[in-house]
Image (tube, rainbow, N blue to C red):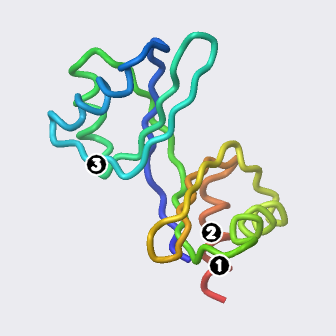
Amino acid sequence: MDVSRVYQLELVVNGKPGELGKVLQCMATHGADLRGVCTYGQNEKGIIQIIPHDALRAENALRSAGYVPTRKEVLVVEGPDKPGAVADLGRRLGKAGVNIEFLYCAGTPGGKFLAVFQASSISAAFEELNRKAAV
């Protein structure tokens, strides 16, 4: 299992058709590639969570277009996609006393899963998952 600490950018936009496209086009225009994106609606607003390859470049691109992204450190975990893989991740962190604050994941080509999450302690989660991965 591969575990990395990365920055996620979060934006609150108007919940109208086309807003996601505008945000992602802004990044593309400035050469800011994305690794992952998650979006959902909340009270007439759209929440966009972006995992860029280069957080500083993406943040600068978004700010230049008038967006106000917030930066959060998250963990990205990649491992074998098998039944119970993400459940195991949750059990490990729970036993270590780490609360998962949000999580989104998907399967990838080649039989792997990719999970992105924020935890009550990113450092403790990172250490626990790396310790377990090394066993």
- Say what amino acid the circle numbered 1 marks: Arg
How many residues crowd mark 3 within 10 Å: few (<14), some (14–19), many (20+)? some
Tell whether label 1 touches label 2 (CB within 8 Å).
yes
Side (left or right) of 96 relative to 5: right
Q: Residue at x 76, y 50 (%)?
A: 99
In which quadrant of the rendered image does the N terminus lie?
bottom right
Sequence-wise first label, 3 or 1: 3
Across and down, in percent, residue 119 comes to: 67, 49
Q: Residue at x 20, y 38 (%)?
A: 28
Q: Nearer the viewer, mark 3 or mark 1?
A: 3
- Say what amino acid the circle numbered 3 marks: Asp
User: Distance of mark 2 from mark 1, alpha carbons?
Assistant: 6 Å
Query: Which residue is denoted by mark 3 in the rendering?
Result: 54
Query: Which residue is denoted by mark 2 in the rendering?
Result: 127
State the SS at label 3. Answer: loop
Query: Which residue is denoted by mark 1 in the rendering?
Result: 131
